[in-house]
Amino acid sequence: MNKKSILTTLLIATAILLVVNYLVGGLGFANLRFDLTEKKLYTLSEGTKHILAGLDKPVTIRFYATRDSRLMPQWVQGYATTVEDLLLEFEKASNGKLTLERVDPRPDSESEDKARADDIAGHVVNAEEDKVYFGLAVQSLDKKEVIPVLSPNEESGLEYILARAIAKVTKPKKSVIGVMTPLPIASPAMSQQMMMMMQKQQQPPWAIFTQLRMDYDVREVAVTTDKIDADINILIVVHPADLPPQAEFAIDQFVLRGGKLVAFVDPQCAVAQNYSSQGNPMMGQPPSSTSPSSSLKDLLKAWGIGYDIGQVVADMTLRTPWQRGALPTFLTISRDYINQNEQVTAPLEVVQMFSPGAFSIEKKEGINATILLESSENQMLIDSATAERSRREPLNNFQSAGHKRILGLRLSGHFKSAFPDGPPKVAEPPKGPAHPGGFPGGFPGGFPGGLPGGTGGAQDDVGAPKTSEKIEAQATAAPAEPVTITTDPLPVSVPAEATATAPVMATKPADPAPVAVSPAKPGDDKKEAPKPGFLKESINNQGVVYLFADADMLFDGFCFQQDQMGRLALVNHNVPLLLNIVEQLNGGADLINVRSRGSTKRGFTKLQEIRDAVEKDYRPKIEQLDHKLNETVQKISSLKVTTDKRGNQSIILGPKEKKDLDDLMATQASINKELRNIKKEQNKGKDYLETWIIALNLIAVPLLVIAFGVTLALRRRSLQAAR
């Protein structure tokens, strides 16, 4: 073959490769992909597919990623490829309704101006103040949702973030949220003259509901209602104390017609205990109060949920430091007891509950239950009176149950009515106002200190763990530094933030469902027939109910504290929990079903397991020495200290005290030396195991490859010899 033929063949082959590359990569022709990853990292969830298939208007996603390798870090470039792959899957699943625009904003270019116009955040990377951009903007007609920065730390929630942004820009209007409660959450308006006559100041709305109003249309629903408006998409019920049957029936019908419910019941609500009014005879207002216990008795029974209104969870592992000890009924729930596989709870670090109850689950056909929050195994149920006393004195009769309790859960699926015979008979409406207009005197200094029965708790309660560092860390899991709330009240790592700048659009209310009317039977005219116009079961299989066994967790005194500037700052993630739930419910059932994607990064889990096993062997001895060391330090600090007129402190020691001090110092030095030796042995054991693992990778694997090659060569040689 001459040179001309070879050149012609190469040109033809190159042309074929270019055409095939264009057909597959550019046009997507025969662009088949097989997801063989363990967690299906590159496969869209059914919820996302349904959202994209239901688009009725064009959506454009502008993906901004600086591609200059001299400016963009290599690890960000790798994540940019992951994001782009997912966006391509979104585009392919949208049937042409979604368009992806890839923009490379380089310094001093028109693409950089475009990124700035879309409010994409730029980050300076060198002395010349060049910026790199990594974010995206989702737009449909005149609505736009901007994600100014994409973080690799949010990879597991990336699909949810994108699906949520698309849902926001395609919703027609703000979602309507109903709030039903006997507590003064929204602070009903009162005239200035009335407030002066009652000699009390109007309490401001709870901060959580002020934040909800930023993005949603929040509407109060009376606790005596017998019907919930059809345009309400989400109903939040807080401490439904003494709820009349017709109101429970209204909630039942709301859930059956497709409404989303978030309910906070409470066996001992401290807020309600402090919420009372002596009334005003001059204005015809009688004394009133709210029961400290609440439930949704008929609904919980119909849903297969057990709940004892008179039982409170006391947990020695999750107990929270209090003024004179640790309060076992004030639970600080750390990540170990928060469901990390659910989108609404995965980003949370700590949730706190005050005197919560507990749920149990009895399987009901068509209903799926998912546990979100739970106690530790070192817990027991106590009655309300004992829980009240535990705030002032030790819980001496504690006996661990040895298993966990459910504190929060989600129900989903097909629900059946708790009132199969129709709406209950309406009772006579109570006289006087449904509830007074605020807390008398408020809660000085936040809620702690204003609790009924004083404060307290025992450091030496029976059953309390003594030496475990992990348990002590969980008991003090509240963040040391408050997180200042801005227009974005959630941490950056939480994908479900509630912003005040981008309106949240509502889902379309469910179409009215056909009514269930029982056919008439002979002889029924003597009985009171069920009233027509009610539902006996869900209109679909997408019902959703969130249940939590505490209502105090939403009160400002348990969620916030004031900083030096008088601004509210988060002390836990109670507020982000509710905001995450509401935002996810606002996206409809499809957004709820968008799973949390796994990460493309794979950790060395086996190596970590080996390290944990070594630490487990040495941990008891280390904890014992730490405890002994703390006792020694306390004895040293207990020696008599005097202060002179200038404020200088000194220790006055006699011969006996000096000898005791020398002995204690020698004991302290000996313990520290023994601790160092044990930790050296522990690290030596870790290093030994790690060395063997490295050796196996460097030697054993190549040896296996060589052995396989030699075996293959010998087999081929024997076959050739046989011929």
Image (cartoon, rainbow, N blue to C red):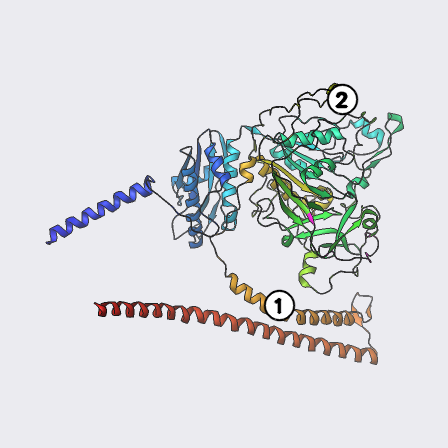
Task: Please tell me the numbered disc located at residue 120.
Answer: none
Q: Give the CA distance from mark 1 to mark 2.
A: 70 Å
> Is residue 339 on the magenta stretch?
no
Compared to residue 515, the image places residue 3 above or below, namely below
Task: Please tell me the numbered disc located at residue 527.
Answer: 2
Q: Position of residue 88 (x, y in %)?
A: 41, 41
- Position of 452 with respect to 722 (left or right) is right
Q: Can residue 307 be seen from the camera position used here?
A: yes
Precedes in sequence: disc 1 or disc 2: 2
Q: Residue furthest top?
A: 525
Write down the quadrant of residue 656 in the picture: bottom right
Q: Nearer the viewer, mark 1 or mark 2?
A: 2
Q: Residue furthest left?
A: 2
Write down the quadrant of residue 198 in the picture: top right
Q: Amino acid at mark 1?
A: Lys
> Is residue 396 on the magenta stretch?
yes
Task: Please tell me the numbered disc located at residue 616.
Answer: 1
Quadrant assignment for the C terminus = bottom left
Number of numbered discs on residues: 2
Q: Which residues are magenta?
A: 390-406
